[in-house]
Image (cartoon, grey):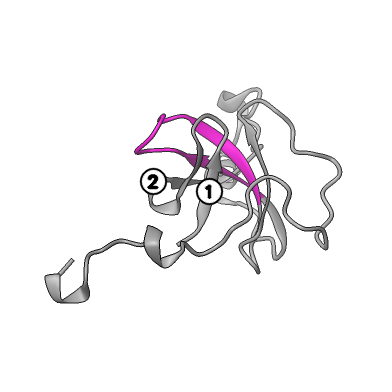
Amino acid sequence: MLLFSCPNCGPRNEGEFHYGGQAHVAYPTHPGDLSDREWAEYLFFRENTKGLFAERWVHSTGCRKWFNMVRDTVSYDIHAVYRMGEQPPTDLDPAATPANAPAQPLAPAQASNTSTSEGV
């Protein structure tokens, strides 16, 4: 498991969060003027970046608020976490150590006590 840092609640287990897709996708200014193809591209076409990628996440079992995260899609390192409406940090360096929320496995003491024999 990874630790995600909610900007409202602090570090939490990744199981408390749900992915919401690519961040910073602007809603069309005149959606009624779009062709079916343009509307479909807005709804369904997203970048598939290898490396740093801005994503939307929701803390679904915590504060239930949406936030943005810049995550490396190769290593899962989290490089920035910031609130909705804010812009991503401009000083992101893919070679740098993650600043806000390092992705790391939970220590055994933090892992679930449920064994596989319990069927869960």
First in sequence: mark 1 or mark 2? 1
Assign a secondary structure to mark 2.
helix
**Quadrant location of the C terminus in the rendered image:** bottom left
Q: Going 61% across and 27% down the picture, which residue do you hit? A: 33
Q: Is residue 59 magenta?
A: yes
Height in image: 10 above or below 99?
above
Residue 5, image x, y percentages: 56, 43
> Residue 113's quadrant in the figure?
bottom left
Q: Which residues are magenta?
A: 54-70
Q: Which residue is mark 2?
A: 16
Residue 114, image x, y percentages: 22, 65
Height in image: 68 above or below 31?
below
Tag shown at residue 4? 1
Relative placement, left or right, of 8 versus 27 is left
Q: Residue furthest front?
A: 109
Relative placement, left or right, of 105 versus 111 is right
> Residue 35's quadrant in the figure?
top right
Q: CA distance from mark 1 to mark 2?
A: 9 Å
Assign a secondary structure to mark 1.
strand
The mark tally for this picture is 2
Relative placement, left or right, of 105 versus 53 is left
Residue 89, image x, y percentages: 79, 39
* Camera-side residue of 90 and 107: 107
Q: Going 50% across and 32% down the picture, which residue do you hit? A: 66
| Crowd tier of the residue under label 2, counting other residues whose Cα lies within 10 Å: few below 14, some 14–19, many 20 or above | some
